[in-house]
Image (cartoon, grey):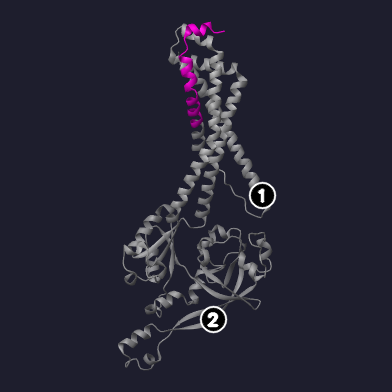
Amino acid sequence: MKLPDLTELALRNLRESLLRNSLTTIGISVGVASLVAMLSLGIGLQELASRRLMKSGLFDTVVVTSRRDLRNFGREEERSGLAPGESRILDEPTRQEIERLPNVLEAYPDIRFITELRYEDKPHLTMVAALPSSAKSNDAFEGVQGNFFSSELAPEAIIQKAFAEELLGRTPKPGIDETNVKELAAPLLGKDLTMRYAQRETAQTASSAAAPDKAAPGDQGLAAAAYSVVSRELKLKIVGVADLDPESMRGPTRARVFLPLALAETLHVMHPTDLREMSRAASDQPVYSSVSVRVKNPSQVQTVENAIKKMGYNTFSILDASRSIQQFFKVLDVFLGIFGSLALAVAFIGIVNTLVMAILERRREIGIMKAIGASDGDVKRLFFAEAGAMGILGGIVGVALGWAIGQVINIGTNIYLKSQSFPPEHFWSVPWWLVAFAVWFSFLVSLAAGLYPAGRAARLDPVQALRYE
């Protein structure tokens, strides 16, 4: 039987039992819509997480720490390199060396310290961190009330929403976050904070300063490590209130007040690293607890990490942790696909039932076809063509239905988010490969459903079929 004749005959048979075949096709459409809706939800959530991480600067950032850092003692990474006591110090020359590496955009120190800030003569103890000018593109500062820093040396501060509530004496209820950041920012923008901090100043011992020629060699080394700590105050102007927490992944070490990086470097704040690195405490070159390295492209993060590790430092990037995240989303996609395919299993049974009923109704027709020369293969191909046609049509309609369901749910969810003062999100995604996969999968399921009816029709005895009433 030629392909045009086969197609014409299959379409004619489908039109004859229009209601039953339409209901079967609708069953396939519902199954495909369920599959598309489930998978598109998983894909959309994964893309949303990726967009958030990319925009937050986590995917293209490598955090560098010295192996002398006590937090790194006992790690497996330590055992493969130099011992902590023999490893290099993470200081300013090292930062500049890292910044000159290929594919590195910038390398800036992680300056953070706990200090006291006074607002309206009331003390508030909190963590303060420095931000480079590039942090302006961070999505946490997109909805900032006010402005970003006017310059890198401006005595200005951006505070986090929770700290703004503390300054105003508001106590949010646990688990409820309904405070509008605009209400918090209105009375705070333009106001002053007085920051009290400990400044490190280089000093010389009295003995070596009075008689440097008589100082012993050991005393010369002690003099080089001598420094003094002076209490300082700095007035900061509140220029912005951030709704989102830009350091939410830092856990208990996240800051609630942010200063310009260049300003923070000029303060020479006393850091724990100054106590740990006594031999370099009096040096003009500061010692850092960690350095954040921004890479030109996330695909180059691993290369930059390897280069920094060869220099004798420890590294960490979100890519190290994202492997488990990717595994989670893969498992989620598998489960969503399984649950979405359950409706297709019902459609599978519906196709089998429809074609078996077609055999009973068309026994005489099948007998005549075989009597005038149609082979068993021709009969099988006829039933496969009918099943495949229902599968393709059901797949196309199901994809459209699944996309529509996703859009409705996405719009409804965004209306709810807006009512809760949250920004809208797009967490439903139907890529082209999912459309092609859904139609192809529907076609295969339909062909599989047609295996038994096609085989049963092909095995009919023409003589018995022609006697059928």
The part of the chain drawn in magenta is 440-469
- Frontmost residue, 394 versus 198: 394
Q: Residue at x 60, y 34 (%)?
A: 401
Query: From the viewer's perspective, is 366 left or right of 406?
Result: left
Residue 240 visible: no
Q: CA distance from mark 2 to mark 1?
A: 48 Å
Q: Which residue is mark 1?
A: 416
- The residue nearer to you, when weighing 15 against 426, is 15
Camera-side mark, 2 or 1: 1
- Residue 302 picture location, percent across and down: 38, 55
Task: Answer whether residue 460 is magenta in the image.
Answer: yes
In this view, the residue in front, 92 or 403, is 403
- Pointer 2: what residue? 232
Tag 1 or tag 2, which sits nearer the N-term?
2
Q: In which quarter of the view is residue 233 placed?
A: bottom right
**In the image, 92: left or right of 342?**
left
Mark 1 Cα-neighbour bin, 10 Å: few <14, some 14–19, many ≥20: few
Question: Dot 1: what SS?
Answer: helix
